[in-house]
Image (cartoon, grey):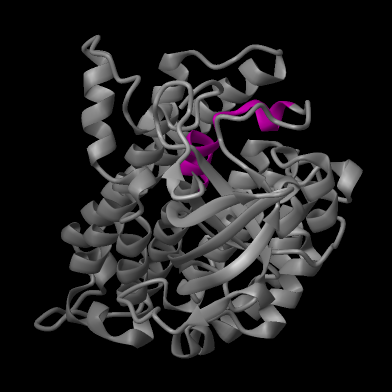
């Protein structure tokens, strides 16, 4: 049975569509859309019920992200980030989780990149830094920034000799948002840079992915970044589904130049539609199958094997790659009409390519998957960054 939030998304879809062009122009989601998404509960799907969240499964969350993305890529990306970071409610120390997520209007934005410097002080850290790509910064209430930890002027090292890293969570009012999001795609996400200067963060509002989760629910036992990759992949899948819908409508209305028949009657259009449909369905199938297997494992109390972790990365990358291929096929088959903003296909192309640029779904992950399949050691790769242990 689908999560109730999915029905809520379908109800909000007309509003998202109404404001999609405004979001594109203003480079942020319109406030009525943000409010409707808040009311739909999509930003609290991964927050535990004990903190007023929905306690949804990873599959349910991915399905909601895909559904929003099938209406508008920028809205879907913002739901993926804001809702995905709700996962932190189970990773933060309880005091920090309560402070942030007891507010039903809390939405997080920010980046894992350790661009900041956090100097240890009594009861916390003194931080400075600048971070890019804070998607949803226009409606976020909290910001997340990765930092390298220092003791005085010396970087703190883990027992394995690696730099100690932590995510720092601060109220959005503690930061300066820089207007940097001038991009080809996903323009409505307000993925601006932000700067933090000389702010103190209590230790209970910090954590890192190698730390044991604070809560016992199965979803918090998933490897964080590998799970995050599946959420990211759900966005291009949704955008590709939108492109399929737009192409179908165009093909039923357009008569190509030098033709007496509709585009839909042309073999080239039929081939492109069939190929694109197959790419999207198979990409979604591998993502769903792999995520379901991982969920079954952690729900049974076990940790994921290295193979399962690797397959999460592989499935996410494969799904995103195939979504891009599908949109490119449809864009080409639509002919000159595709370049007009009125068709919507050019935005789908820009958005899907931008989403697939994320490092978590970049094609280099397929190289890592090949290394793993060939029996090579990948434990020092990005796949191990969120391992539950020293990393």
Which of the two residues, 113 or 260, is positioned nearer the viewer here? 113
Above or below: residue 273 compared with residue 332: above
Left-right relation of 29 to 35: left
Q: Position of residue 195 (x, y in %)?
A: 50, 73
Residue 290 within the magenta-colored segment of the rendering: no
State the residue at coordinates (51%, 64%). 128
Above or below: residue 2 compared with residue 72: above
Q: Residue furthest front?
A: 152
Which of the two residues, 369 or 332, is positioned nearer the viewer here? 369
Asked whether the viewer can see residue 53, the reply is no
Left-right relation of 6 to 159: right
* Quadrant in which the N terminus is drawn: top right
Q: Position of residue 157 (x, y in %)?
A: 45, 32
Above or below: residue 306 compared with residue 333: above
User: Image quarter for residue 296?
Assistant: top right
Which of the two residues, 148 or 343, is positioned nearer the viewer here? 148
Q: Which residues are magenta?
A: 218-231
State the residue at coordinates (57%, 49%). 167
| Number of on-image labels | 0
State the residue at coordinates (75%, 74%). 36
Q: Position of residue 311 (x, y in %)?
A: 40, 24
The kind of secondary structure the magenta stretch mainly shows is: helix
Left-right relation of 318 to 32: left
Above or below: residue 264 compared with residue 163: below
State the residue at coordinates (69%, 32%). 219
Which of the two residues, 252 or 272, is positioned nearer the viewer here? 272
Left-right relation of 329 to 57: left
């Amino acid at each position: 049975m689908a999560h109730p939030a999915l029905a809520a998304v379908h109800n909000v879809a007309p509003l998202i569509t109404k404001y999609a062009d405004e979001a594109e122009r203003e480079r942020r989601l319109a406030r009525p859309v943000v409010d409707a998404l808040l009311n739909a509960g999509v930003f609290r799907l991964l927050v535990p019920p004990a903190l007023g969240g929905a306690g949804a499964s990873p599959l349910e969350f991915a399905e909601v992200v895909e559904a929003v993305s099938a209406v508008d890529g920028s809205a879907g990306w913002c739901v993926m980030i804001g809702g995905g970071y709700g996962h932190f409610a189970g990773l933060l120390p309880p005091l920090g989780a309560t402070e942030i997520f007891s507010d039903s209007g809390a939405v997080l934005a920010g980046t894992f990149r350790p661009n900041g410097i956090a100097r240890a002080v009594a009861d916390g850290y003194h931080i400075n830094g600048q971070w890019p790509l804070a998607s949803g910064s226009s409606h976020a209430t909290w910001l997340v920034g990765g930092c390298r930890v220092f003791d005085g002027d010396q970087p703190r090292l883990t027992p394995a000799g690696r730099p100690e890293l932590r995510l720092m969570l601060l109220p959005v009012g503690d930061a300066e948002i820089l207007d940097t999001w001038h991009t080809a795609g996903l323009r409505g996400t307000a993925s601006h840079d932000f700067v933090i200067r000389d702010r103190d963060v209590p230790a209970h509002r910090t954590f890192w992915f190698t730390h044991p989760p604070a809560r016992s629910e199965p979803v918090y036992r998933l490897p964080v970044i590998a799970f995050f990759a599946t959420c990211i992949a759900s966005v291009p899948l949704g955008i590709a589904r939108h492109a399929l819908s737009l192409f179908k409508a165009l093909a039923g209305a357009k008569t190509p130049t030098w033709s007496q028949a509709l585009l839909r009657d042309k073999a080239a259009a039929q081939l492109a539609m069939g190929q694109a449909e197959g790419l999207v369905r198979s990409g979604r199938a591998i993502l769903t199958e792999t995520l379901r297997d991982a969920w079954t494992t952690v729900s049974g109390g076990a940790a994921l094997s290295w193979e399962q972790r690797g397959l999460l990365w592989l499935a996410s990358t494969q799904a995103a790659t195939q979504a891009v291929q599908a949109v490119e096929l449809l864009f080409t088959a639509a002919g000159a009409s595709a370049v007009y903003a009125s068709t919507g296909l050019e935005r789908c192309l820009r958005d899907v390519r931008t989403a697939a640029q994320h490092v978590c779904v970049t094609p280099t992950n397929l190289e890592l998957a090949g290394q793993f399949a060939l029996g090579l050691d990948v434990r020092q790769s990005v796949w191990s960054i969120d391992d539950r242990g020293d990393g």
